[in-house]
Image (cartoon, rainbow, N blue to C red):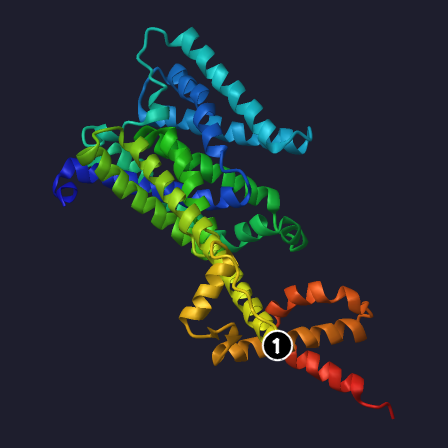
């Protein structure tokens, strides 16, 4: 592909991939703790740190402004936590109060001290990934994109931190009470995670901006939560979704649509989320609807077979249900597959009908003899429960009947 042959485009793609993977890793932890929007709060809360870094040093270099942004992000996290724990304020409200206050303070500082200086705080929101190839630094004589260095460092720190605190953070996420009973330093672990989030977010701001940081913290982890039931798989799927979003979003923004790269990556991640919501095997809307329709068809077919068998034994005529209904579709399938002929079950259909009637009889006897339910109240629940009885439950019910019929010694 052309994107791999052009050095400038490849560097943009590489920075985007590293940033999305780094954000996706911490996003899993924040999503499990219902704090996915912490990245958005940090994006607004670092503005006073950026301004103070410039005020104290008089320089727009990366180091002082990064330190100021990092201190501001950590202050935001600690203040929000303090309000939540000490003042008993709701976590979302505490975060909203703190980040709006810090953001407003940053705007005031910009107006007071940097009116005559080109200090563009908007780069925090939108990023400068398109200029990755032109903003370079030398490390041991090798010229590298400045953004690549910062996001690579953030990813490396994330990997090391995840390996060191994997079990502890996992226990704190799923069962904080268990973590305290195990005498784990829960508050220290949570604060270290917030520091990691702040480090990741601030490291990625200059390259991809807060729009992509917020999207990559929240969306891949949400998709992983829809697709996976285990923490380890969630982490893997979240990183894979981040990589795919970075690749397809960057390629589309550069070669197809000609638009903002971080914004297109975020839109691509949103598209993946849309697909996951609709197509996820266990929780997706379409698979769940398909399983529901399949189940209703199975119940309708079993009921039709049982009813037709009972009617044929009594010498009564079976009437086909209305065509445009679940029962009508079930009747059509039974006729096509040869399980129902002339209003009477045959072959496999007859075996299914006899098994269902046997289940119904077993349940009614059990409910009457063991549960003491009146016989005139058993028909309706039996028609529902009979479809859920498997062979093992039927054997238990039969054994219960035999033990009940056995005379006492």
**Residue 318: image location, x then y, percent:** 56, 69
Left or right of residue 225, residue 60 in this image: left
- The answer to whether 403 is drawn above or below residue 263 in the figure is below
Q: Quadrant of the C terminus?
A: bottom right
Q: Residues within 10 Å of mark 1 (few under 14, many from 20)?
A: few
**Depth order, front residue of 390/346:** 346
For residue 149, side relative to residue 121 (left or right): left
Q: Position of residue 114 (x, y in %)?
A: 37, 10
Position of 373 with respect to 211 (left or right) is right
Q: Give the number of callouts.
A: 1
Is residue 370 visible in the rendered structure shown here?
A: no
Task: Give residue 144's quadrant in the image.
Answer: top left
Q: Nearer the viewer, residue 32 or 332?
A: 332
The residue at 69%/82% (across/down) is 398
For the point 74% across and 86% down, which residue is it?
Answer: 402
Secondary structure at badge 1 equals: loop
- Asked whether 224 or 175 is in front, the reply is 224
Q: Give whichever of 79, 56 is nearer the camera.
A: 79
Expressed as whole percent of the image width and height from the top left, the position of residue 287 reads: 44, 55
Residue furthest out toward the right: 409
| Residue for point 66% across, 29% down | 89
Tell me where residue 92 sits by quadrant: top right
Rendering coords of residue 185 (x, y %): 61, 47
Taking the image as drawn, is residue 219 in sight? Answer: yes
Task: Decide: is 299 above or below 289.
Answer: below
**Residue ID for mark 1:** 315
Q: Residue at x 41, y 12 (%)?
A: 110
């Amino acid at each position: 592909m052309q994107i791999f042959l052009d050095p400038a485009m490849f560097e943009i793609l590489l920075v985007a991939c590293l940033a999305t993977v780094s954000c996706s890793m911490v996003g899993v932890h924040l999503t499990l703790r219902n704090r996915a929007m912490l990245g958005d709060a940090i994006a607004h809360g670092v503005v006073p740190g950026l301004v103070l870094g410039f005020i104290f040093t008089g320089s727009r270099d990366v180091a002082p402004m990064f330190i100021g942004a990092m201190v501001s992000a950590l202050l935001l996290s600690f203040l929000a936590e303090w309000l939540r724990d000490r003042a008993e304020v709701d976590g979302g409200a505490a975060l909203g109060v703190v980040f709006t206050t810090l953001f407003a303070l940053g705007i005031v500082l910009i107006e007071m001290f940097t009116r005559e200086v080109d200090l563009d705080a908007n780069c925090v929101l939108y990023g400068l990934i398109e200029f990755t190839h032109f903003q370079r630094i030398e490390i041991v004589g090798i010229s590298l994109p400045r953004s690549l260095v910062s996001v690579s460092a953030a990813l490396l720190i994330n990997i090391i931190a995840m390996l060191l605190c994997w079990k502890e953070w996992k226990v704190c996420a799923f069962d904080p009470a268990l973590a305290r009973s195990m005498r784990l330093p829960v508050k220290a672990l949570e604060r270290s995670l917030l520091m990691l989030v702040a480090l990741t977010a601030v490291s990625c701001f200059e390259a991809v901006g807060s729009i992509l940081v917020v999207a990559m913290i929240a969306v891949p982890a949400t998709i992983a939560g829809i697709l996976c039931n285990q923490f380890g798989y969630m982490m893997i799927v979240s990183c894979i979704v981040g990589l795919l979003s970075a690749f397809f979003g960057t390629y589309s923004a550069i070669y197809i649509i000609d638009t903002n790269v971080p914004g297109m990556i975020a839109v691509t991640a949103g598209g993946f989320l849309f697909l996951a919501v609709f197509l996820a095997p266990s929780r997706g809307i379409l698979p769940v609807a398909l399983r529901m329709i399949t189940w209703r068809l199975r119940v309708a077919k079993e009921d039709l077979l049982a009813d037709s068998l009972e009617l044929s034994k009594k010498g009564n005529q079976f009437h086909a249900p209305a065509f445009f209904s679940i029962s009508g579709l079930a009747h059509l399938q039974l006729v096509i597959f040869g399980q129902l002929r002339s209003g009477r079950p045959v072959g496999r259909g007859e075996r299914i009908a006899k098994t269902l009637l046997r289940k119904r009889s077993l349940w009614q006897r059990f409910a009457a003899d063991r549960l003491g339910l009146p016989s005139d109240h058993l028909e309706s629940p039996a028609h529902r429960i009979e479809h859920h009885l498997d062979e093992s439950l039927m054997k238990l019910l039969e054994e219960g009947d035999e033990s009940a019929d056995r005379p006492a010694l």
